Amino acid sequence: MMKVLIISSLVLSAPLSAQMVSLAIMPVLLFSALAISSSLNHLGLMNYDMVSAGLLVMVFWVTLLMKLSQFHAPFKSSLFLLFLVLSLSLILSFSTNNIMMFYFFFEWSLLPIFMIVIGWGYQMERLRASLFMLFYTLFASLPLLIMIINIISSSHITVMYMYACLTSMPQSGKSLTVMLIGAFLVKFPMFFVHQWLPKAHVEAPVGGSMILAGVLLKLGGYGLLRISPLLGPSSVLSKVLIISMWGGGMLSAVCISLSDLKVMIAYSSVVHMALIIAGCTSASSWGANGAMIIMIAHGVCSSGMFSFANMMYERSHSRNLVQNKGMLNMLPAMSMMWFMLCVANFGGPFTYNLLGEVLLIVNLISLSGPLLMSVGLISFFSAAYSLILYASTQQGLPLGSVFSMSNMSYREILIGMSHIWPIFLMLLSPSLI
């Protein structure tokens, strides 16, 4: 544990040139570490499998791109220190094999993002947004702590894979199941408990939005993938699946009427989380693999969309779609990157998102036929609001105030390409996840 903490601190606090070199070799090092991870597993503290390794690579990737995107900020050293603390908490959450340590790092990650939103937010509403985020996630995670303590005291097992150790686990009641998975559903977030996410995204700086949508939400998916096999078939999981899918369909329809750029991207994240929840609660290998693929693909895609939204905001000083129209005439390179990200956002051809959605759709066909109607709503409206987002910002004549826009810098081109190429190239080797 100390080795991971020290190495992560050195990498994330190193100069940018050193970080880019380490980023290039980090996937090789992590996947090579799987060969010797069995000795760490016997200690009961660390765990490295393909799920953890994929999420760890995404933590390093999004963190470095986040530091590149957060180029202009007051008290930048303090902000980067919070980014470092947040990244370390995520790394340790995805690495630990002890369920109590996982809960500790799971909650520890809330404090840095709370300070980022309240300290570097854009408007006065950042206090309300940060409190929304704090109380939603905090109150939902307290029942999880009670359940963890109860399971450890009754079985004396502390590993994350407790379902492999408990041969005679009694069937949990509905209330106990909700207590066990409620924290992860709020962290996603699931429909009905999603109100904190758009508020946090709108008020957070670009780096906070990137790490929040790219990695922090995936803590819910990671925890649900580890915990759901313990529950087995349950009526509560079936209801969660139905509510999540139909809620995602309704929210995808709501996205069409939104005019705020960051709010639309935030609600689209909730729609994608509905698909991930469906895969995690389906108790099948197809659903788990599809959920894992969409977690990786959405983490990269949503981070890129928030980064490009900030680039447009820095030029037009507005998040309104109409105020940013005509970008195709002013910034054709940015327009091309926007198009590729929008295609990936609705699972277009030749993207990693499409592979995950195909796996989840096949899984849902085997589970329930009526749920395909909600899948159709999500697929149709996702394509609709993604194309509306692109057409509203890129087509048309630019307003008079945007004629002074500067062209894309090399830093911005590097950020854009670093978000785009993994979405398309990972499709060539889906066995990595």
Image (cartoon, rainbow, N blue to C red):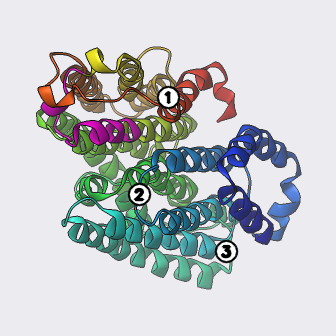
Residue 369: x and y in percent read 31, 28
- Return the residue at label 2: 73
Residue placed most toward the observer, 72 or 394: 72
- Find out whether the residues at labels 3 and 2 contact each other: C-beta distance under 8 Å: no
Tell me: residue 189, above or below residue 307.
below
Looking at the rendered structure, the kind of residue marked 1 is: Ile
For mark 3, what is the residue?
Answer: 158
Residue 9 image offset from top left, x and y in percent? 69, 64
- The residue where tag 1 is placed is 413
Residue 130 visible in image: yes
- Comes first in the chain, label 3 or label 2: 2
| Nearer the camera: disc 3 or disc 2 | 2
Residue 4 — which label? none
Would residue 50 be found to the left or right of residue 352 on screen? right
- Rendered residue at 57%/71% (across/down): 105
Q: Amino acid at mark 3?
A: Thr
Residue 127 image position (x, y, % from top left): 24, 71
Q: Mark 2: which secondary structure?
A: loop
Of residue 272 and residue 287, the one placed in the foreground of this image is: 272
Say which residue appears at 52% left-offset and 59% top-offset: 223
Real-space Cα distance between discs 2 and 1? 20 Å
- Kind of element beneath mark 3: loop
